[in-house]
Image: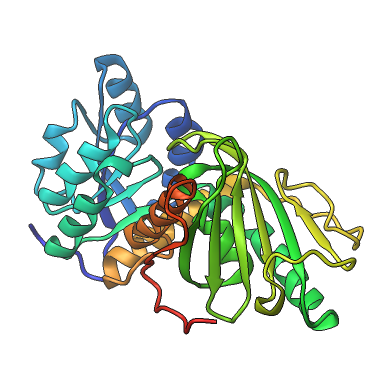
Amino acid sequence: MRQTSESEPVRVGLIGCGRWAREAYLPALTRLRGTIDVVAVATAHPMTARLAGAALGTRSFVGHEAILALDGVEAVINLTAHDPAAITLAALRAGKHVCTELDVGRLAAEIAAEAERQGRIVQFCTWPHVYRPIHVALGSALAAWRQRHPGPRAVSVTWGWPAEQVWHPLEGLCGPIARVCAAATPPGHPQVALVEFAHGDAGAVVSGGPLAPAMRRRIRFEFSHPSGLLTRTDDRLDFHGEQADELLPGGGQEFPFYDWHEDYVTMLADFARCVRGRTPPRMGIDTYLRSQRLEAALHASRHAGGEWIPTLDPPSPDP
């Protein structure tokens, strides 16, 4: 396959063109012409294939196989709901980089191995990207609160979040996670995973119920200082971040409104830079695997009795 130089647009094939692709991705791709060129589009139905091809001014196909066979396609944007994990893996085997917004849980480890073997990038365009401004605002508030209130502390974060993306708000708020421990809980009680952060804080992730991939659940995060693990104090800070327009606690400050369409432009432009420079994306398959490990710790919490589940971050010293 002909290599793309840094000065050339990245040539992509778009697989899937349903409602979300039309609302979020097509406008962004139109704005990014010259950075990303859509050279082909494929959908499962002839009519949507023709409409998508006409909208993008490019060739259209029924079924993804034709796009994966095209030598002129360097990368794939995989937006189909029809077995997205298998299509992501097939695209990597065909030597394509992949950008996707869909769950690849059952094949995540195989996808990671194939991406490394092929020297290709897998980037996830997911809600954590869209909510990144909120993570930044809450993270700044948390850092300022730590400075004002040293010693044992507890922080509660309630968030409606897809289970397979639990990892991202944790990293966004508190930084790199060193390791995760499955904590035994009685039957019928919420699942709990103990967490150690690289900067020394400790805490727990408490699920609001059984977790399932790609299902939106209410997850509660609780963080505390190692000297008082999960110890509640009178000086308590609570975050509730389900909506972008909610108030920052105690500050009376609203999150600034922003157009999520702009985030898709940013995400896709970031993907193009990663492809051209062969640099890892901010949210790649490694981040996804860490999220799976955290979810596995939650699932195992009723049985594991304190077994540490390794992450891809360097382990921290035992407290």
Q: In the image shown, does 271 or 314 lie closer to the viewer?
A: 314
- Relative to residue 60, is residue 221 drawn left or right? right
Q: Quadrant of the N terminus?
A: bottom left
Across and down, in percent, residue 99 comes to 33, 50
Asked which colour scheme the image uses, the reply is rainbow
Left or right: where does residue 171 sit relative to residue 240?
Answer: left
Which image quadrant: the C terminus? bottom right
Q: Residue 240 in the image: x percent, y percent?
A: 76, 50
- Of residues 130 and 296, the one nearer the viewer is 296
- Residue in front for this viewpoint, 160 or 219: 219
Q: How many marks?
A: 0
Residue located at (26% from left, 17% from top): 45
**43 above or below 226?**
above
Name which residue lies at 34% across and 60% down.
272
The reply to whether residue 174 is in sight is yes
**Residue 3: in sight, yes or no?**
no
Residue 233: percent from left, percent from top: 84, 67
